[in-house]
Amino acid sequence: RLRSSTAPPPPPPPPSPRLRPPQIETAPFAFVLNESRAWVEQHVPYFHSSDEDLNTAYWYRWRVFHLHLARAPKSQRTPGCDPKGCHVITEFLKKVPWSGPANTIVCPAGHHFAEARWVKDGRYAGDYARFWLRGAGWRKQYTFWPAHSVWRHSLLVDARPGAAGSLAHELLPALEANYRDWVRTHYHTGARCMFQSCHADGQENSATLDGCRPTINAVMFAEATAIAAAAAAAGNATLSAHFEEEAARWRGVVLERLWSEDLSFFTTLAQPPPKSLHAEIQWYRRKDSPTKGNSQSVQTYFGCLACPRGRACPPERGWPVGKLVPVRELSALASPWYFGAVPAAPAGRSRKFATAWAQLHDAKGFASPWGPRTTERRSQCYNFSNAAQCNWNGPVWPFEVSKAATALAELLQTHPPQPHAGIAAWEALMLTYARAHTRARAEGRAPPHVDEDLHPDDGYWITRRKLHISPYLPISPPISRGR
């Protein structure tokens, strides 16, 4: 019998051992995590780098996240939430007068979602979204981007983003209703753009003040884009097509109306509040309104807060209506890329807009030892005098630095190579951000610490110092709003 001339195939290799995630070793950071250590080890992704400031800041941020987890009152029953009350996330540990139910404030909610989507237990992100969109949360008190947040959450956690059973699918009607409600009250029909006051943008005494700001208009692009994607995933082609048109409209506003050729930068188009917003405020002041006369659920502050008369910058009567404000602000750098309003193609147009990033490391622009300033250093409006506790006219705000870092990452990952922005700039920004947590000075507290605004040159937390030792604010005992 003839033997086969072909050798038999070799036996298959033994199966590879199942890869296991690295064991989270948090012992070196026990001094940071304290009683949050067990929860963090159970719920969050492992991270380690060669930079100790970055490592410490990472675990500290999760400690802070855990401290701010709370529940809405059980009596405020919200469909889909935990029967014991919606899981929510607070901005301040102690109750502040301008907060809503359960001490919640919508201003940082977009950041809260960005962190909560990484928590292994999806109830935190899910309940928090339901609280704002179906529950008692004051969702129009500050600029808010729930559709963008919920869609990003779905992209991360769902095998089929937006499909039936996902959070995006569940909340699609509420997200659409929220979008239309914002357009109803904040769309400026004369200027054909979205109005927002700097205060309701979460940026008290921003140098460009009120008007059609790059922030809110970039947010509307992201909201429309997310709703279009969620509608497409749900099989609603008509709704998806409508919101694709909406997204194109807002992109046009940002790129064509809010770009200053003189500054090579996005900026605010000065406008007064639209009549529809004034009508909304009056409605909330009525006793038969949903808040029974409490107008705090929508912002009622316009212009410069606690500012002296006779000032030159910003002008006492406001910036000239219908004109682009000649001041560069960090929020106008971060928002267009953070929310994806600047397209990657054509490459020449992408590079044109990305020239704005040269200001990030310019000493006359935003650069400082402790992070990017909120207003360019060269501006006459930089650090203008006023009696307000918080100001966005120069100090470093971690709120906006984190947006800028995300925006720069989006630029580097999705756009052609840029001459004014590279990986080295992103790494430097992240390390400076981390060291603001681990090395900045806070009265009465050892680092790590995070607060509202940081002195860009001297590295101390400004509002904390004002509330603790300022002779102009004799408060006893001192108030702490940090962490």
Image (cartoon, rainbow, N blue to C red):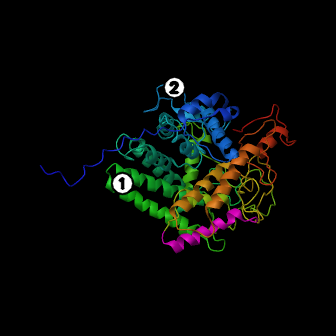
> Relative to the observer, which residue lies in front, 39 or 477?
39
What is the magenta range? Answer: 345-364
Find residue 455 and report its horizontal and vertical position in percent: 78, 51
Q: Give the residue number, with chain letter if any, for mark 1.
A: 239
The residue that mark 2 highlights is 74
User: In the current view of this chain or complex, which residue is farthest to the front?
Assistant: 1
Q: CA distance from mark 2 to mark 1?
A: 35 Å
Relative vertical location of residue 307 with respect to residue 69 in this rendering, above or below? below
**The residue tagged with tag 2: helix, strand or loop?**
loop
Circles 2 and 1: CB distance less than 8 Å? no
Q: Main secondary structure of the magenta part?
A: helix
Which residue is at 50% across, 25% downward? 84
Residue 463 position in % (x across, y down):
77, 44
The one of 56 and 93 positioned closer to us in this rendering:
56
Residue located at (78% from left, 37% from top): 446
Specify the quadrant of the image occupied by residue 45: top right
Q: Position of residue 58 (x, y in %)?
A: 63, 42
The amino acid type of the residue labelled 2 equals Lys
* Residue 233 percent across, percent down from the top left: 35, 50
Q: Quarter of the image for the C terminus: give it.
A: top right
Q: Residue at x 67, y 46 (%)?
A: 54
